[in-house]
Structure formats: C-alpha cells, structure tokens
Image: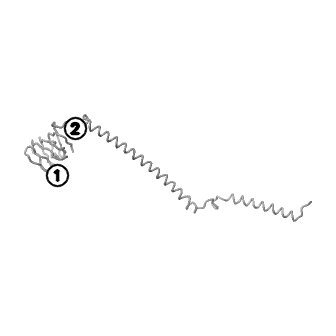
Amino acid sequence: MKPTPQKLTISIAAVLMLCLLVSGYFAVAAESGSAEDPLITQSYLDAVVTPKAMQAAEQAAGEQAGALSARINALTEQIDQKITAAAAALASDETFLKRIAAMGGGTAADSGTWKSLTLSAGQKVYLAVGSEVVLRSGAATCFESGGKGLVNLSEVGELTDGQPLSLYALYTATTQSSGFQAAERTKVLVTGDYSLG
C-alpha cells in the first residue's frame, strides 16, 4: 500500500522538525558557559560565592594566627623559665660572683674585706646598705638614694647630695644605692656590696 502524498508530507515535516529541535539543542548547549551566556552570573558571584569564599579564608587565617600565637606564648614561657633557672644558678655560683667582682662590675668579692678601687672622673659607686667606704686620694661627692646620703662614722654626721667626701673619713650607706661620684681620678677602699656606674 503506497503512502498518500498527505501522509508523506506530514512524515517529512515531522523529520525536519525533529532535526531542527536536535540542532537547536546542540547550538544552545554549545553556547552556554561562554562570555555571552555564562553559567553563573556576575551578581550571583558578588552576592553569594565571593562572600562565602572571603569568610572561609578569614576563618582559616584566624585559626592559623591563633595557633601561631599560642605556640609563640608557649615558647616564650619556656625561654623565661630557662632564663630564670640560669639566673638562679649563677646567683648561687660563688666562683662566678667572685669573677664578676674581680672585674669591677658587681659586688665586692667577699663581704667584710676591704677592696681598693681606682675611679676615673665621673664614675659612680652605688653602695648597698651597710657597705662602707674610705676616700684615700682624689675627690668625690655624695649622691642620695631615697632622700638619704652617706653617714660619716668618723665625725658622726651625714652627707647629702652633692657634698664632698673627706679624705680618710669612714662613710657608710644607710639606703640601697646611695653612694658617691668621683670628681677626678680617685682611689677609695670599699667593704661590702657595691656596683659601679
């Protein structure tokens, strides 16, 4: 049985329509994602994707900074503990203390013994409470600590800030870090703890 011209026309039209639909689909699929037809719009990127990405980055950076800060604090505490332990060990090391005193940088080598010092002009000697000094040559002036200067045990008097020490007089400190300053090349005898400035 032969198809009628009307049925043949309808069949050809249906095949053509199907071809047009398939080619249109592929054309649309090929153009999607291009600059003219992006898969994601700029407004969506600006409003949704970018803020989320920034928030995630800030959170990760904050967590990393917190971890680094905790690590630094822990290391600082360990270093402080080691320094404290080393300082305590040195403070009880008699050999070390005597070597420092022999270099003229700290305390007298042995409390109760006299040590001879030669000072240059402008050099200061800070005395501990109870330390004593005798001016042998040169010139020196008193400086105060806590409003107190040096007590002259030879004449039972007190020196205040700026007053000169007398030759061969015996002075003692009644406050921590009071002392005297050499006005020229000066020699003194010191007993007790002192430091040079």
Q: Secondary structure at mark 1?
A: loop
Which quadrant of the figure has residue 41? bottom right
What's the CA distance linking mark 2 and mark 1?
A: 28 Å
Q: Residue at (29%, 39%) from the top-left corner?
A: 88
The vertical placement of 167 against 95, above or below, is below
Q: Mark 1 belongs to which amino acid?
A: Gly
Q: Position of residue 36 (x, y in %)?
A: 64, 62
Question: Which mark is drawn over residue 162?
Answer: none
Q: Which residue is mark 1?
A: 147
The vertical placement of 10 against 188, above or below, is below
Q: Nearer the viewer, mark 2 or mark 1?
A: 1
Q: Residue at (51%, 56%) from the top-left corner?
A: 55
- Left or right, 24 with respect to 102, comes to right
Question: Which mark is drawn over residue 101?
Answer: 2
Question: Mark 1 packing: few (<14 Cα in 10 Å), some, or many (20+)?
Answer: few
Question: Going from the N terminus, do you reach mark 2 or mark 1 first?
Answer: 2
- Left or right, 45 with respect to 171, comes to right
- Left or right, 77 with respect to 166, comes to right
